[in-house]
Amino acid sequence: MIPYERHVFICTNQRDPSNPKGCCASKDADEVRSRLKKLAFDAGLRGRIRINSAGCLDRCEDGVTIVVYPEAVWYGNVGPEDVDELFHEHVLNGRPVERLRTDRPAGADR
Ligand code: FES
């Protein structure tokens, strides 16, 4: 049994700007993380929802990359403007945000 209702991992990895892989830090990962943490805190979910920074999740081209457990849903291209929806739909109510998912099979309707 996992100790949290939802456990969110946000890649905040930073690379040198000259690195061709890019990184989530250069795509506002810290702001995404801060907004999610604030929403969870303001909702009084401390101890029920855990939001962690993560190192590179090896989906750099899709960054900002996020994984939400226990559903193991992967998200990509998440920006600060997506945080409210991600929080209220998935983190709070368990409904994955389909338009941001990157774990769907190739050719799946997006
Ligand atoms: S730098 Fe974020 S997934 Fe690699």
Image (cartoon, helix red, strand yellow):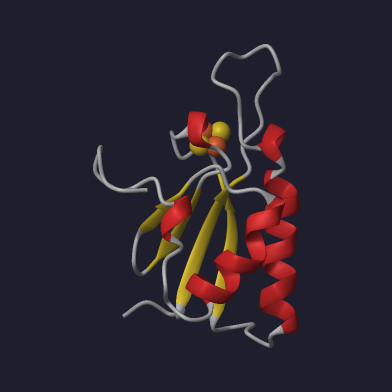
Q: Is residue 85 left or right of residue 108?
A: right
Q: Position of residue 83 (x, y in %)?
A: 64, 61
Quadrant position of the N terminus in the picture: bottom left
Figure label count: 0
Tell me if residue 43 comes above or below residue 86 in the rendering: below
Q: Residue 33 falls in which quadrant of the image?
A: bottom right
Q: Nearer the viewer, residue 65 or 2?
A: 65
Q: Position of residue 5 (x, y in %)?
A: 45, 80
Q: Is residue 33 left or right of residue 57?
A: right
Q: Position of residue 58 (x, y in %)?
A: 43, 33
Q: Position of residue 34 (x, y in %)?
A: 74, 59
From this viewpoint, which residue is outermost toward the bottom? Answer: 44
Q: Nearer the viewer, residue 53 or 61?
A: 61
Q: Residue 15 falls in which quadrant of the image?
A: top right
The residue shown at (51%, 63%) is: 8
Tell me if residue 95 comes above or below residue 75 in the rendering: below
The residue shown at (68%, 11%) is: 18
The residue shown at (37%, 58%) is: 73
